Every structure is written in C-alpha cells, then in structure tokens.
Image (cartoon, coloured by chain):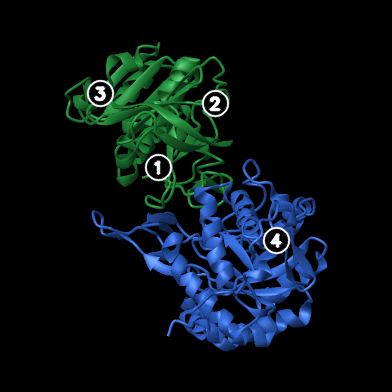
C-alpha cells in the first residue's frame, strides 16, 4: 500500500455517463490485481472530506486507468480536474478476484459502474463471457474500450435499446441453462440489487462465484469499521477482507 | 524565543506522571485500527503514544450498517464500539504492542462498575505494555455505557474512584459536551482521581437522505468528527485549561501541525489525530516533523514555552502602552 501524489494525464468523458481518468505510477502499476481498489483524495481542503474509492480499470506499463461515474459532489469535482493536476491516491487496497478458476468457464457479470474491475480481470486473465447490464444504449461502452477483451460480450439494457431487453440476469440464466454448473465460475460487480439477483440465480443453478461489494468507506484500510459485510466469519470489512467475497461466504441480503 | 535552533535542539517530549511521551502526537481512539492497520504509512514507534480503539469486557458486534456518512468538513459515525473484547486484546494485541516503543494507552468502556473492574485489573497486570488508560465516558452511539448513560454524574464519579483504587496507571477521562458542562465534569473526574482529560469526543449529529427520507445512519444519530468540530474542541481545551492544570489530550478535527499548535497554545499537552487518519494516513508523521520545525524556526526548545501561552485581549491590555 502506497500513499502517493500522482499527476493526471487524461480525464475525459467517454460516453453519456462514464469518465476515464489516467495517471502514471511506477510503484502502483506493478502491484495491482483485478478487484483491488484505490482511495482518492479529491481535494487538499476538507470538502469533500473523505477519500473516494475506485476500482482499477486497466494498467498498461506504468499507466493506470480508472473509470467513474458522477454520483455526487466528489466525483463531480473529480470530473473537472484537468490533465496536469495532482491527485493523492492510496492503493492498492483490498482483496483481488481469484485467479484460480480450476479450468472452469469464467462468466463475468457487470452492472453499471461495476464494469471496470471485470474488464481489468478479463484483459489480464481472460474470460468466456462478459455480460453487461446497462440502463440504455447511451451507457454502452465505446467499442474500443473493450476491444482487448477476448470474452464474448453480451449486453442487456433495461429499455431494450441495446442487446437483450431486461436485466443482465436474463442473459446469465440463458447461459446457465446451456452449461454444466460445475464447470462455471461467476464473478460479478455492480449495483447491490443486481449482485443479489446474480447470487440468487447462481444459487438456483448451484454455481459458485465471487461478488465485489461496494460500501461507503472512510479509511480503506480496515481501521474505521464503517464498511462491514455479514459473512461466514462474522462481520468483515469490505475494504480489507473484501471487496471480493465468495458467494458462499455472504450471510446477508445485499439489497 | 528568537534564535533559530536545529531540529536536534528541540525537545518535543511531554510527561504524564511517570510516562514520558517523546512527542505530543497520538491517535484518537477508534481511528487507528486495533493493531497494525497503518503500518505501511506510519512508523508506530515514532508516535508520541498509541491510543487503542475502545475495548469492552465482552466482544461487541457494533451497530447496523450504514455506520458512516460524510458531512461538510467531517463525517458522522455510529460504529457502536465494535471490538473483539478484552480476552482477544490480551491474547492478540498486547504481544504486538509490546514490540512497539511508543507508549500504549488503552481506551476502555463499560456498562457497569464490574465491567470497569475486570478491565482495569487485567490492564494493570499488563503494565509493561499498557502505560495509561483512557476511559470512554462519552460514546454517542451506544445505550448502556454511552454518553446518555454517563450523564448521571455519580456514575462517572464511582467509576473513576473504583479505577483509581485498582491501579496507579495514569487515568485519562474522555469527555464530550454531550455529558453536560465540560468544565464542571472535568473538575469532578479530576477530584475523583483521574490524572488527565481527553477533550473532546465526537458531537452527536445526524443527516437525512431526502430521496428515501431515511436517516443516513442506521443508528439515526452518530458522532460528528473532523475539522467541522475543531473550533468547538479548541474552545473546550481553552476553557478547561483556565481552571485546571491537569494533563489534556486534545482531539477534534486536528489535521495539521498548525491545528495542533493552536491546541497547544490553548493549553493541550498532547494532540490526538482522529478522523485525520482516514484522510491522511501518514498525517501523524508529518505533524511530528512540522511541529519540530515550527519550534526550531522560532527558537522554541520545549513545548512548555508555548503551552497555555495564549495571548488574550485582557492580557494584552495589561502590557499595552497604547493608551
């Protein structure tokens, strides 16, 4: 874990909803695994006060990318930072997605801004399917953002404007009906409602998997105990014990 | 105070009874984890002291989620004293801290005199590692043993008196204005046998999500911390220092050496960084360096030269020849 001040290289809007921020860090780029996150100090002043957690999206050489959506004041201010400005970041934080998939087919299920760590995972380790849920076509990623993902990419949109109409779990269920559940591993990140639905489908088909849980955080290092998740080992922190947990370990409804 | 000194000439140490802290910088209870969470950013042995997260006799699960929420220049928390209990502390934390040279101050809370008795007896036996005890009398987020419970003054008095009868370890009472008149209660805890005061704990506050119309914290209310409460904390240190010479650990939104120096000038002996740790994990390390630099630049050899040295309008008038 390093607390480092980096320089923003790029910070651009890439579709109706998402922004991509690029910076350089030799130290960080060598140690980051898909599923881990960083805690960004938005301003040197005290408002917004707390750091903001973001998943890593892509690492090429010493160049790191994060993908974000404006969800409040912090990300709003971040979106106005020009290239050349400094940003203080603490990372890498948290546990990674497992890379030990024991020859199974990997199905990645992303919803909304849960996509970045799964793209990172697919690029690094490969996957068979990347299922993406979005509200509408306007939130669909530009093709070149996903061109280095070798997995078969399927979309579901709430309004049917792109890909399958409905929730991403519809796509997941179609796939699971065709596959041998013992030979599948699901890894998912997205809104809590979606992740719960994915876990419910997985339970129905007896498929194992991992979920990346995003809770409000203050410290990111397991000190404040603000981001607790109910697990088989009792309350655990999303920031240090997670954010990635096996489905079988979760002992609460996520939504 | 005019000559510039080298950093080596500056002695930042502070003393509480027989415990010497090599500098005045410590961490507020509950903001620094339970063991080595900050080890990649902080050299624990360089801290003036380490104050633990509150320990209770039995493990506590803490409150439901959500437990934290950001507010302007601060945050609300309602963790609810989640901890693994006394036995885990003795078995797993004491051995770790025995290898850290910074003195350990253990923060404790209880619901009954018996709770406090069990805690103090166990900690007294660990005197080699435990160098002082901070008593959490002002947690805003639990019922029994929390700030409302402690509003009954005789409870506080009997707790301090009992602790005093069990140990010669320095006892520090952590107070907040939620308890009532801080100056008055400071006097009472000192009279009951406390050696020092921790001023202040969080202030009770709340926030509401206007879309769902739900409170942002499952506990509805929580403790407000961060720079938002710093002027309030400073005022209490100043007011208590006017009446009492006891050792004061100041806390409340202290982020930088500049903030810390305000508190020292108002009369604080030590400075606890709390919420600051969440935002600037290495803030304590920088603060130690910056306080030393402030002193060396101004020819200040020890913090005694500036502690409680506030120049108030009335003291100014006494020296003024302007009329």
Q: Nearer the viewer, mark 2 or mark 4?
A: 4
Q: Quadrant of residue B51?
A: bottom right
How far is mark 1 from mark 2, CA to CA? Answer: 30 Å
Question: What numbered label is drawn on residue A42?
Answer: 1
**Horizontal relation, residue B287 to residue B72: left or right:** right
10 Å crowding of disc 4: few (<14), some (14-19), many (20+): many
Of helix, strand and loop, which one carries label 4? loop
Of residue A4 and residue A189, the one placed in the foreground of this image is: A4
Residue assigned mark 3: A140
Q: Nearer the viewer, mark 3 or mark 1?
A: 1
The chain that hosts pointer 3 is A
10 Å crowding of disc 1: few (<14), some (14-19), many (20+): many
Question: What numbered label is drawn on residue A227?
Answer: none
Residue assigned mark 4: B12
Relative to A63, residue B119 above or below = below
**Horizontal relation, residue B168 to residue A148: left or right:** right
How far is mark 3 from mark 1, CA to CA? Answer: 27 Å
- Looking at the image, do the residues carrying marks 1 and 2 touch, with CB atoms under 8 Å apart? no
């Amino acid at each position: 874990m390093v607390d480092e001040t980096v320089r923003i290289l790029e910070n651009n809007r890439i579709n109706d909803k998402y922004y991509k921020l690029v910076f350089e860090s030799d130290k960080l780029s060598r140690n980051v695994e898909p599923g881990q996150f960083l805690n960004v100090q938005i301003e040197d002043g005290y408002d917004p006060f707390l750091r903001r957690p973001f998943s890593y999206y892509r690492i090429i050489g010493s160049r790191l990318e994060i993908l974000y959506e404006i969800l409040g004041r912090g990300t709003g201010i971040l979106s106005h930072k020009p290239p050349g400005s400094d940003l203080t970041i603490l990372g890498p934080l948290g546990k990674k997605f497992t890379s030990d998939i024991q020859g199974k087919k990997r199905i990645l299920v992303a919803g909304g801004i849960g996509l970045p760590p799964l793209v990172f995972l697919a690029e690094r380790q490969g996957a068979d399917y990347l299922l993406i849920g979005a509200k509408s076509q306007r939130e669909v990623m530009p093709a070149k953002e996903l061109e280095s993902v070798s997995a078969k990419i399927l979309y579901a949109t709430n309004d049917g404007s792109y890909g399958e109409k409905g929730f991403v779990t519809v796509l997941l269920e179609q796939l699971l009906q065709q596959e041998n559940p013992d030979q599948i591993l699901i890894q998912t990140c997205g809104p809590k409602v979606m992740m719960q639905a994915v876990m419910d489908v997985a339970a129905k088909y007896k498929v194992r998997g991992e979920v990346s849980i995003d809770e409000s955080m203050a410290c990111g290092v397991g000190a404040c105990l603000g981001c607790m998740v109910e697990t088989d080992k009792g309350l655990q922190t999303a920031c240090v014990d997670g954010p990635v947990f096996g489905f079988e370990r979760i002992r609460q409804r996520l939504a | 105070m005019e000559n510039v000194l080298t950093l080596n000439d500056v002695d930042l140490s502070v003393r509480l009874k027989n415990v010497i802290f090599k500098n005045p910088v410590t961490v507020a209870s509950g903001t620094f984890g339970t063991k080595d969470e900050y080890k990649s950013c902080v050299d624990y042995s360089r801290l003036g002291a380490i104050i633990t997260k509150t320990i209770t006799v039995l493990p506590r699960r803490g409150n439901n989620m959500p437990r934290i929420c950001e507010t302007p220049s601060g945050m609300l928390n309602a963790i609810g004293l989640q901890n693994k209990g006394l036995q885990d502390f003795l078995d797993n934390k004491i051995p770790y801290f025995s290898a850290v040279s910074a003195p350990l101050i253990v923060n404790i809370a209880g619901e009954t005199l018996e709770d406090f008795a069990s805690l103090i007896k166990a900690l007294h036996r660990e005197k080699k590692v435990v160098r002082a005890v901070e008593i959490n009398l002002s947690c805003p987020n639990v019922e029994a043993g929390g700030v409302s419970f402690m509003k009954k003054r005789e409870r506080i008095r009997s707790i301090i008196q009992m602790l005093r009868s069990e140990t010669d370890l320095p006892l520090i009472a952590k107070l907040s204005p939620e308890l009532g008149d801080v100056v008055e209660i400071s006097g009472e805890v000192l009279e009951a046998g406390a050696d020092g005061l921790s001023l202040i704990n969080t202030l009770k506050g709340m926030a509401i999500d206007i879309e769902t119309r739900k409170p942002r914290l499952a506990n509805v209310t929580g403790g407000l911390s961060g720079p938002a409460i710093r002027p309030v904390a400073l005022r209490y240190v100043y007011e208590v220092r006017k009446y009492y010479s006891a050792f004061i650990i100041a806390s409340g939104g202290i982020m930088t050496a500049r903030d810390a120096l305000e508190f020292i000038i108002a009369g604080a002996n030590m400075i606890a960084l709390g919420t600051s740790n969440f935002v600037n994990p290495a803030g304590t390390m920088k603060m130690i360096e910056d306080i030393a630099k402030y002193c060396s630049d101004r020819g200040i050899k020890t913090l005694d030269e500036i502690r409680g040295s506030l120049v108030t309008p009335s003291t100014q008038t006494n020296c003024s020849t302007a009329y």
